[in-house]
Amino acid sequence: MNYQVLARKWRPHNFTEVVGQEHVVKSLINALQHNRLHHAYLFTGTRGVGKTTIARILAKAMNCENLHDANPCGVCKVCRDLDEGRFLDLIEVDDKVYLIDEVHMLSGHSFNALLKTLEEPPPHVKFLLATTDPHKIPVTVLSRCLQFNLKRLTPSQILAQMEFILHEEKITFETAALKLLARSADGSMRDGLSLLDQAIVFGNGKVASEDVNAMLGMVAEQPVEDLLTALARADAVTILDKINDIANTQSDFGEVLQQILQVLHRIALVQHLPTAIDPDFDTEMLTTLAALLSPEDVQLYYQIALIGQRDLDLAPDSRSGFEMLMLRMLTFKPVTDEPVTNKPASLAVAKTVAPPTTVTASTLPPVVATPVQQTSSSNDWASIITQLNLNGPGKALANDCALEYMDDKVCSLFIDSDRIRGALAEDMLQKALQAYRGTAIKLVFNSQKVALDTP
Ligand SMILES: [Zn+2]
């Protein structure tokens, strides 16, 4: 007996079996029950979300001899013919229903013929069209169709269907493995079930996380969890150990970084809204890490990881790039509950001020150097810093600066020309100043060779 692929074998045969797309199914059932069918339907959406499946069910329902609550019976001749039918681009049911798949592939000539028919539809003739690309369909045709846009399926919907099918097929599986497959399906049930087919073959009749990870060329979530836990504990030894492990498993560091970003995003959501926990992820890991890491840490790590994606390609090799990235997270780990010192200091800057060398926004009008004002002593700056609620690189940068002047539009800071500034630190400082002043403030740095007495 031939092996039938899961997507084909478990293709829904009636509206009740359709996964998701509730908005479409409900409208169609209503139309069937009240006998208010449109003469032309267009189903749009990405691949594998159920366009043709729903169109086929509707075609059956329009002709079924024995409808049950708007659902086709599945046993009459019309139902059986359509269920057993092969995957055809054009299906014709007793000259009454025409189902055209991938309708955007029609030639201009065929569209004209279709348009003529749609303009004056013969009574009792229905058109069911499906396409992944509605933009390629002439507006004249679109305007005569009732259009339904099918949504991508969520990983949870795909996961639930996979679990159902594997139970029915009596195939053992690990839920974590199905979660990986469901996420990789990228919203397409057909792609998800096709991956599941492969996983069953790959795992010799069972679906285990380790096999699925290997099959998808993915990194298990465990190293990501270990890395983030070690970061939270500022444990450099473990971090470097884990990186060594990852290198030994021949994993792609770019892929690990992607996963770190995904996990950090989920952690941030959980920290701000505990009910937002994503069931498609390892929920225990998310809860543990959300408690272990401070929200500031999570934001900082996310930012460093995001920018680090770009740097990874520039590094001599991806491993060293990744190591530097993790160590950067460790270096800039925000110091919380640090006793704030407001040491008095005097600003020792030459009176002839050089023009600003760096401007954070190109739209900034030229800033005329003004003499240091009485009110903007470094003493004030130190007290401003304490009110900025900065940490990590932003705070380090602020501490290396002295205030030249600040109004509602511009904050100009003296900085030692030897100090290397980072975009992240500048961004943190700019945002903090903006929040402090309550206005859109531009940050200007004025490099000084003179030794600054900074806070
Ligand atoms: Zn039937």
Image: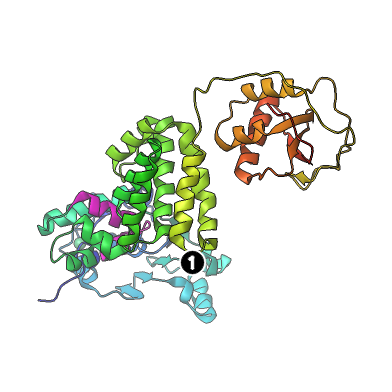
Name of the residue lying farthest toward the front:
451
* Label 1: few (<14), some (14–19) or many (≥20) C-alpha neighbours in 10 Å: some
Q: Residue at x 85, y 27 (%)?
A: 372
Horizontal side, residue 23 vs residue 402: left or right = left
Assign a secondary structure to mark 1. Answer: loop
Determine which quarter of the picture holds residue 274. Answer: top left
- The quarter of the image that holds ligand 1 is bottom left
- Residue 424, horizontal then vertical, whole percent: 60, 43
Q: Residue at x 27, y 51 (%)?
A: 179
- Residue 310, horizontal then vertical, whole percent: 54, 57
Residue 190 among those drawn in magenta: yes
Q: Nearer the viewer, residue 309 or 314?
A: 314
Residue 441 among those drawn in magenta: no
- What range is drawn magenta here? 174-194
Instruction: Please state which amino acid type lies under the numbered disc 1.
Output: Asp
Disc 1 residue lies near ligand 1 with CB under 8 A = no
**313 above or below 395?**
below
Q: Tell me the quarter of the image containing the N terminus.
A: bottom left
**Magenta stretch, main secondary structure class:** helix
Q: Residue at x 79, y 37 (%)?
A: 450
For residue 48, say whether it is visible.
Answer: yes
- Residue 5, horizontal then vertical, whole percent: 21, 69
Determine which quarter of the picture holds residue 211. Answer: bottom left
Horizontal side, residue 308 vs residue 10: left or right = right
Residue that numbered label 1 is attached to? 133
Horizontal side, residue 37 vs residue 119: left or right = left
- Residue 139, horizontal then vertical, whole percent: 57, 65
Counting the numbered discs, the total is 1
Q: Nearer the viewer, residue 182 or 157?
A: 182
Q: Tell me the quarter of the image containing the C terminus.
A: top right
Q: Residue at x 48, y 43 (%)?
A: 329
